[in-house]
Amino acid sequence: LLAEEARKKGLRRAEGVSVLVLAPTRELVLQLAKVASRLLQYSGGLVRSSFVVGGFSVQEDIERLKADAPHILFATPWRLVHHLQSTPHFVRALGSVQSLVLDEADRLLNPVFVHKVDYIFRRLPCSRPQMILCSATFNEHIQKFAVRSLRANLEVISTTAEDVHAETHPVQTKTKVEVAKPVDQVLIRYDPHKFLPVLHALLVKEMLAAEGEAKRVLVIFPTVRWLQFFYVLLKHRANMPGLLSLHRSLSADRRRNRAVQFSKGAPATSGALFATDVAARGMDFDVHSVIQVGCPEDREQY
């Protein structure tokens, strides 16, 4: 649409940041920016994209934005708020924003992020940008934000294979939550005192590949502290090979490198990635199995 609008105006390319996309983690922002960059190659240079996330210096962000001259900007709320508060003329640079996209909206609108999102929404020069909320669930946080910030004619678009449609719904809309049919689910009940040997045996079983086949496992923990405790025990005390962790306490370089190792297109190797549900959310990991440690926050989250 941006490319078509630029062509109608007789411009060589679109002008200014027209679309602002927010995502909860830097890994997800980088993944989105990478995919967008590939797709925008087909625009003939009419539309460009860029990103701002933590893990890079503020000066690196500024130099990248000057070089990219983006029309689509991907960002995490925390880094974007920092630029809005501290970087000269940054608010003015967002003066042409027409659309604000919240990816993984149910995460962005929970108590951890919602104040930052509200701040960004208020600082945008355009008082009523088009709002697009992308979410696998339509929970209470999204409903409250919709009532407060969206126009009355909220449009809910389902992209499920069985029910692709676009209709106007009241904000009380509930989504049908079902697990994908090809997924085999197994519930394991264990003695709490024997969790470590159970997890170790399960990892060995899932990573045990047939000849010439590598299997990767994603293990989702509810907290960083729980994740790190069992990661250290298994990797350094049990000398279990192929284990990696992904959480907010790691340096930016380590987080990026570990996410890449388990992404689609990475060399096929056996291993397990220990991650929190927030760190793993929305990421395009290429894994054979997923182990959910403990109960998820709710059925929709699962």
Image (cartoon, rainbow, N blue to C red):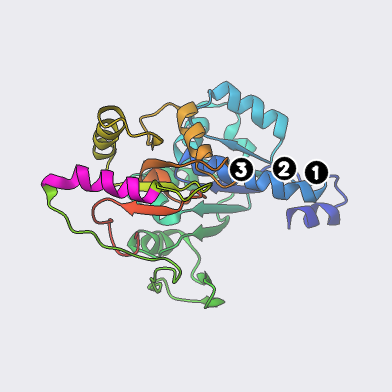
Query: Disc 1 marks which amino acid?
Result: Gly
- Residue displayed at 50% across by 33% down: 256
Q: Is residue 203 visible?
A: yes
Mark 3 falls on what kind of element?
Answer: helix
Give the crowd class for mark 2: few <14, some 14-19, many >=20 residues within 10 Å. many
State whether residue 121 is above or below residue 90.
below
What residue did someone put label 3 on? 33
Using the numbered discs, state the Cα–Cα distance from disc 2 to disc 1 in whole angstroms: 7 Å
Q: Is 292 placed left or right of 30 in the picture?
A: left
Q: Is residue 95 visible?
A: no
**Residues tagged 2 and 1 counted as in contact (Cβ below 8 A):** yes
Magenta stretch encompasses residue 197: yes
Mark 1 falls on what kind of element?
Answer: loop
- Residue displayed at 55% across by 27% down: 87
Q: Which mark is residue 48?
A: 2
Query: Disc 3 marks which amino acid?
Result: Ala
- Residue displayed at 30% across by 50% down: 202
Mark 2 falls on what kind of element?
Answer: loop
Give the crowd class for mark 3: few <14, some 14-19, many >=20 residues within 10 Å. many
- Residue displayed at 27% across by 43% down: 200
What residue did someone put label 1 on? 45
Query: Disc 2 marks which amino acid?
Result: Arg
**Residues tagged 3 and 2 counted as in contact (Cβ below 8 A):** no
Q: How many marks?
A: 3
Magenta stretch encompasses residue 293: no
Can you give x and y, in whole percent of width and height, for residue 16 in the image? Answer: 70, 42
- Along the line of sight, which residue is nearer the eye, 215 or 249? 215
Q: Is 151 placed left or right of 171 in the picture?
A: right
Using the numbered discs, state the Cα–Cα distance from disc 1 to disc 3 in whole angstroms: 16 Å
As drawn, the residue found furthest toward the front would be: 211
Q: Magenta segment range?
A: 193-206
Nearest to viewer (mark 3 / mark 2): 3
